[in-house]
Amino acid sequence: MSLSNDAPRFRAGVILALFVMVAAPALLVIYQSVLDAPFFDDNVRFSLEAFRFVLTDPEFYRAFWTTTLYAFGMVLVAVPLGGILAFLITRTDLKGRKWLEPIVLVPMFLSSIVLAFGYTVSVGPSGFVTIAFKSIFGSAPWSIYTLPGIILIGGLSHVPTVYLYVASAMRRLPSDLEEAARTAGAGIWRVSLDVTLPMVLPALVFSAALNLLLGFETFGIPLVLGDPNGILVLTTYIYKVNTIFGAPTYQVMAAVTVFLILITLPLVFIQRRLLRHARRFAAVGGKGARTNLLKLGTTGQAIALSLIGLWLLVSVFFPVGGIVLRAFVETWGEGIKLTEQLTLANFRAVFEIPSLSRGILNTILLAGFGGAIAVAFYLLVGLAGHRNRGMSGTLLDYSVLLPRALPGLIVGLTFFWLFLFVPFLIPLRTTLISLLIAYIIVGLSYGLRIIQSTLLQVAPELEESARITGANVYRSWRDVVIPLVKPGLAGAWAMIMIVFLREYATGVYLMSSGTEVIGSLMVSLLTSGAMDQIAALSFISIALTAVGLTLALRLGAKIHD
Amino acid sequence: MTELVVENVEKWLGGLKILSGASFKAHKGRIVALLGASGSGKTTLLRCIAGLEQPEIGKIVIGGKTALDDKAGVALAPEEREIGLVFQSYALWPHRTVFENVAYGLKLRKRPTEEIKTRVEAILDKLGLAHLAARYPDQLSGGQQQRVAICRALVYEPKVLLLDEPLSNLDAKLREEARFWIRKLILELGICAIMVTHDQGEALAIADHVLLLKGGSIVQDGTPMQIYGRPNSFYAADFMGTNNVLAGAYEPQPDGTGIIRCDGWSLPGVWQDAEPPRDPSDIRAVVRVETVTVTPEPTETSQPLDVEGCIYLGDKWEYRLKRGSVRLRAQGTAALPADVAHCTVQPASTWLFNP
C-alpha cells in the first residue's frame, strides 16, 4: 500500500458524495416497496401489500417470463452474429472492412426507441418495406409485433456491443500464438478454431453476460413493438402499472423494481468477475500488426459480404431509412407514389409545438453542456479513484456497479421522487439540473470507464517524478495528469454527448414542462400516437447523433475499449 | 558529511517481506550503488528512500531531516524530502519542453523567473544540452533524454540524488561513456548519490561504495575492490564476475589453507566465507575465469584437462575444459592445439565457501 494516504480527504469526500448519489435511488426504491402508499403520504405504513399484489398478478408472471425469454433470445441472436462479424472484419481479408466497421456500429449509437420506431415504419404492418413487399408478392410473411419479432430486433440492435468486445479481444490477440500453431502444422481454419476461439472466449462470455443484463433492463424496443399486442416486459410492466390502476402506484412500481434488481445485481457482479478474467487473458499482451489475414477466396468473399449486407440491410438500412423517409411524408400506402408526397410539414409541426422545439434545444443543451459537466464530474471521481489503494477505492468500485443494476427508467423515477421531496432539491426539479444529475448517474459506469482508462495511460513515473521534484499530489494532477489526458477528455466528452443524446428512459418521469428531452418526448407521444411528430423527432435525433459522432471521431474518441 | 541514513527498513507486501532490515549510510560527494539481481529489493529500497513506497518499519534521515520513522509516526511525502530521482524510463513530461521539464522543480520552489532561467540554462549548458532547450522530449535521443532527466533531478540542488538503473536504456557504447561522465559530474558537484543497478560493471565503475542485496537484505558492502576481490559469501562471489563453480568436500590443511576435493580432481584454496564450514562434505569453490591459466604444455603446478571446445570472442578465446565431473572455463589468446590442455589455478584465487 504505497502512498495510500495521498489526498485522503479529497478522495473520501468525492467518493462518499458519489456513493450517496447512487445509493439514494436504490434505497428509496427498497423503502418505497415496503410501504402501502407513496412514501411522502401522511398516513403511510409499512406493508408487504405491494409484493402480495405483484406476486398474485398473472400479468407480472407473464412479463417476467417474457423478459427472461427476451434476454436469453437476444443473447442467442447477438452473440453469434457479433462474433462472426468481429471475426470477418478483424481476421479475414474481407473487402471493404475498413469502412464497414463504423457502419456496423451504427445501431449502438441510436436510442432503442428510435430504432424500434424505425422498424415500425419500415417493416411494421403498414411499413414502407412491408407495403412494397406486399405489392410485389401479395403478402408479407412476417410480423414484428410478436415476441420472436421483438427478440430478433432486440438481438440485432445489440450485435455492435458484442462486436466491440470480441473485435478488440481479437485485435489484442498476439499473432505469434497463431503463428506458432501454424508452424506446428495447423491449417488456417484449424488455428481459428483451436487458438483464436478459445482465446476470445472470455470476451464472448463477457458480452453474453452484458447483453443478458441489457436484456433484463430493456425498455424502448418492447415498449414500441410489444405494446400493440399487449406484450409486456418487466420495465414496460412498471411503466404500465399506472395505467392499470389509473393512479400512481409507486409501491407496486418499487416492488417490481426490487424483483428486477434481484436479477440484475447478481448479473452485474458476474460481469465484473468475468471482466477481470477476460483482462487476465488479454494481459498476455503482444503487439505488432497482424500480417496474416485469413484468405476468404472469391466464394468466401461473396458469402461473407452478402451475410454482412443482409445484416446491414435489416439492422441499419431498414430502421434508419424508414425514419428518414417517414419524416418527410405524411401519407403513404399501396398505390401512393412517395415522391409526390415529400413534405416538411412534420418538421414544421415539431417546431410549432413549444414543448417539442424546447425538447430539441434541451437535448442539445444537456448533451453539449451537460456532457461537459458530466466529464468534469467523472474526472473528479476518476482522480479520486486514481491509484487509490485505500478503502475508499473499494467503495468507489461498488458505487459504480450499483446504477448498472437500475434501468434508466427507474433512476429517473427515483430522482423524480427525490427532487419532489428532498427540501433543498425541490427548486431544482423543474430545471435541467435534475435531469443532468440523473443522466450523470445513468452514464456513470460508461463515462468513468473511459476516464479511468485514459488516466491509466499516464505512466506512474510521470506522476512520481513530479512528486519527487516537489509537487504535492494536487499539483501533480494539475501539472502532469490533466494536461496529459486532455485529448482523451475531449474524446470522452463527445462519447458522453452521444450517450446523453440517445437517452430516453431517464427523462420519462423526471422531465417536466420546460425540461422536455427528445427521447422521453417520443415515449409520451407514443401514447397519443402522434407518429408524424415522432418521425420528425427521430430524424432530428439521428441527425444530432451523426453530428456527435463526427465530432467524436474528429476529437479522436476511442470507440474501442 | 552524512547525508542519508537508512536504518533497519522493513517493507512487506501482503505476507511477503520485500525488505528485511536494510541499513546503511551515505555521504556527501560519494556514490553508493545498490546492486542485486531482480527481486533483490534494490528498487524497492530506492523507492522507500524517495517516499514512493512506505516501509512498515524503519528510519530514514535525509540531510539531517527525518523523512521516515515508524516509531515517531513520521512519513514525509516525496515532495517534502528534498531529493532528486532519475527514473529508469527518465519519465520526462511529454507535454513540456526540455527547459520546462528542468525548470519545474524551481518553479515549485517559487524561485524568481530570472533565477530559474539562469540556473536552468547553466545546468543544461553543463551537460551539453543548451541547444535543445526548446525541444520536446520525443524529439531527443535516448542519451539526450537521460541527460535532461539528470538535469531535472539536479537543478534544485537536492540533498540526495537517486538514480534508478540510469544506464539500462542506453546502448552499449553510450553506456560506457555515461558511466564515466555521470561519476565525474557527481564528484564535481559533491552531492550524495544512490544508484540502483543490476549490472555489476556499472556498480564497480561508478560507485565508491557497493551494497550487494539479496532477498531484501544487504549481504555484503564495501568498496568496489572489496566486493569484487574479497567476497565473503558464495552468493557474493558467484554474483560478481564470470566464474567457475566447483562442488566438493573440504579438507583443511595445517597451514591454514584448505583443499577442495571434487570428483577426480582437487584444488588447494583459501576459505573466504565469513562463517566456518557448516558441512565439510559439501562446499563450493569459486574461481574467477580470468585467474585460470591454460597452457598447451604441462607446468609444475598444472593439471591436465580434456578440451571440449574453444570459442572465439574477438578480443580473446574462451576454453571449455572437462575432467570427470569438473567443468572449467578459462581464457587465452589463441586456440588450443590439442585435445588435452594443462591448467593452473592459483590457491589464492580458489575461494572456498559454504554453499
Image: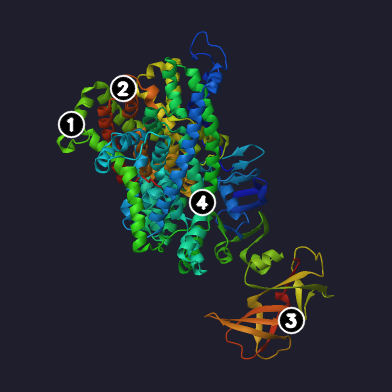
| B323 relative to A516, above or below | below
Which mark is drawn over residue A201? 4
Circle 3 packing at 10 Å, graded few (<14), some (14-19), many (20+), is few
Instruction: Give the distance between the C-alpha atoms of the residues marked 2 and 4, in whole angstroms.
Output: 46 Å
Q: Are marks 2 and 4 on the same chain?
A: yes
Residue B333 screen position, x and y as percent: 57, 84
Instruction: Give the distance between the C-alpha atoms of the residues marked 4 and 1, in whole angstroms.
Output: 49 Å
| A346 relative to A419, above or below | below
Q: Amino acid at mark 1?
A: Leu
| A336 relative to B330, above or below | above
Q: Earlier in the sequence, mark 1 or mark 2?
A: 1
User: Which quadrant of the figure contains the C terminus of chain B?
Assistant: bottom right
The residue wearing badge 1 is A344
Q: Earlier in the sequence, mark 4 or mark 1?
A: 4
The residue wearing badge 2 is A528
The residue wearing badge 3 is B324
Which mark is drawn over residue A16? none
Instruction: Give the distance between the C-alpha atoms of the residues marked 1 and 2, in whole angstroms.
Output: 21 Å
